[in-house]
Image: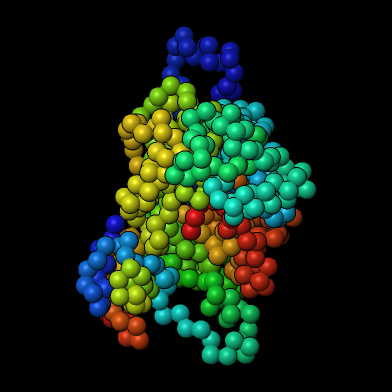
Amino acid sequence: MLLIPCPWCGPRPENEFHHGGEAHIARPADPAAVSDSVWADFLYHRTNPQGPYAERWRHQYGCGRFFNCVRDTATDKIVVTYKPGEARPE
Amino acid sequence: MVHFSAWSLLRRAFGGAWPEQWRSPEPRDAYDAVIVGAGGHGLATAYYLASEHGMRNIAVIDKGWLGGGNTGRNTTIIRSNYLWDESAAIYEHALKLWEGLSRALNYNVMYSPRGVMMLAHNHHDVQVFRRHVHANRLQGIDNEWLTPGQAKAMCPPLEVGSTSRYPVLGAALQRRGGVARHDAVAWGYARAASALGVDIIQNRAVTGIARGTDGAVTGVETTRGSIRTRKVGVVAAGHTSVIMAMAGVRMPLESFPLQALVSEPVKPAMPLVVMSNTVHAYISQSDKGELVIGAGTDSYTSYSQAGGPHIATQTLEAICELFPSFRRLRMLRNWGGIVDCTPDRSPIIGLTPVPGLFVNCGWGTGGFKATPGSGHVFAATIARGEPHPIAAPFSLDRFRGGRLIDEAAAAAVSH
């Protein structure tokens, strides 16, 4: 089980959280204006890398807030967590 | 290749070592096609390319040993009672191939149609499974509805009492479903493919996909040199996104760890496969006597081939409620495999935006059952350069066109 540092509450066990998929995927501002390929990319296509990965978590059974997290998917080690709206740290 | 028969077994019993069942050649500089991934699906693809399409100058390449990924890690359940006609077509195609596979390969894959029973624990389950039973009847696929009493008669260790923590309100039974020996499937296909001239290259990872000025595939780069080819079939299961990224193709896939466990071996107690989607417990008994238990996926994407212990614990708690007589069994082993899940829980088989690059992936948590059918239609797709009719609905392009094949309920492992 992961120990996830919530940016507001500090480190908590994984079962307090809900995984929210890949982070930094922006919904097209005008869905009607984009092609099917762009829309499919937004809906379905994911980076799914083996290595550092920016993902969203929600502290469902804690503060209830979303945040972003960089985790290495090869080792499951969490590199950093940061608040929504902030850029992915280097 | 030694032909297996009662006579050849008897003769070997009186002396002489068994020869290796497949060759381990050094790769050639060029092949007509290269399959990336020597699991069941990849080896089956190579076998059918050689046996049905005359493509014998081909290679299967794997970063590890053959059958060492999800083929060696799954719970070996075989069934074809999915919901939609497209799914029924491919899983039933596979089931029909399973029925004659040992004879076709001259290798005992120990296919055992002992029946697969899916438990309904609430009103919603009852409605969904009965809908599946009706859909399967229209498709000509056997699937029948059982009362709790009939389910108990099929599987005596099952607790169906009304005071149970997880009451059984009924079950869907596919009698032709069952299990097969996972290693034997990989070995049988490897042996038969090798005998037809297919080179199986183990312990050599693909590190790049080379493309020409027109964008078409020209070869693969590996950890020990490059190999030229005009056709590459990617059958890399959980690592498909990583391989496809080498050709610049983004996939609608997420890779999750999926866990399984086996118990200490006991005398025969489980006459068939029992699956419970709602409380997440799969259980059957291997021929060695171990109870083979399938657990769930972790909530997060990962390539670590190890899941959180709370996932396996949850499944064991459900098993102990459903099968009280198994409560004192000890677990021998617990492991994880990386499964590639699509948004609609149906596979992707076919062409890609890159000419010469083909992909067979997205089998998610239930690919073993499809192994022969998957390899069969993928081989035809690679050989002809156009989708096999059964594979056509499972194109990568369906996500752009919105023609999804939603099997979230039938795919069973809760995601």
User: Can you see residue B266?
Assistant: yes
> Residue A11, how many percent across, how many down?
22, 68
> Residue B361, how many percent across, how many down?
55, 56
Colour scheme used in the picture? rainbow
Task: State which quadrant residue B173 falls in.
Answer: top right
Question: What is the tally of numbered marks visible in this picture?
Answer: 0
**Residue at the spot 38% in from the left edge and 67% down from the top edge:** A18
User: Can you see residue B338?
Assistant: no
Q: Residue furthest top?
A: B14
Q: Is residue B52 above or below residue B365?
A: above
Task: State which quadrant residue B293 falls in.
Answer: top left
Q: Is residue B343 above or below residue B10?
A: below
> Residue B266, how many percent across, how many down?
40, 24
> Residue A55, how many percent across, how many down?
37, 72
Q: Seen in the image, is A87 located left or right of residue B286?
A: left
**Residue at the spot 33% in from the left edge and 31% down from the top edge:** B328
Q: Seen in the image, is B353 located left or right of residue B310?
A: right
Q: Nearer the viewer, residue B89 or B280?
A: B280
Q: Seen in the image, is B369 located left or right of residue B204?
A: right
Q: Residue furthest front?
A: B163
**Residue at the spot 46% in from the left edge and 48% down from the top edge:** B280
Assign the N terminus of chain B to one quadrant of the image.
top right
Q: Is residue B266 above or below residue B43?
A: above
**Residue at the spot 25% in from the left edge and 78% down from the top edge:** A8
Q: Nearer the viewer, residue B44 or B308?
A: B308
Q: Residue furthest left?
A: A10
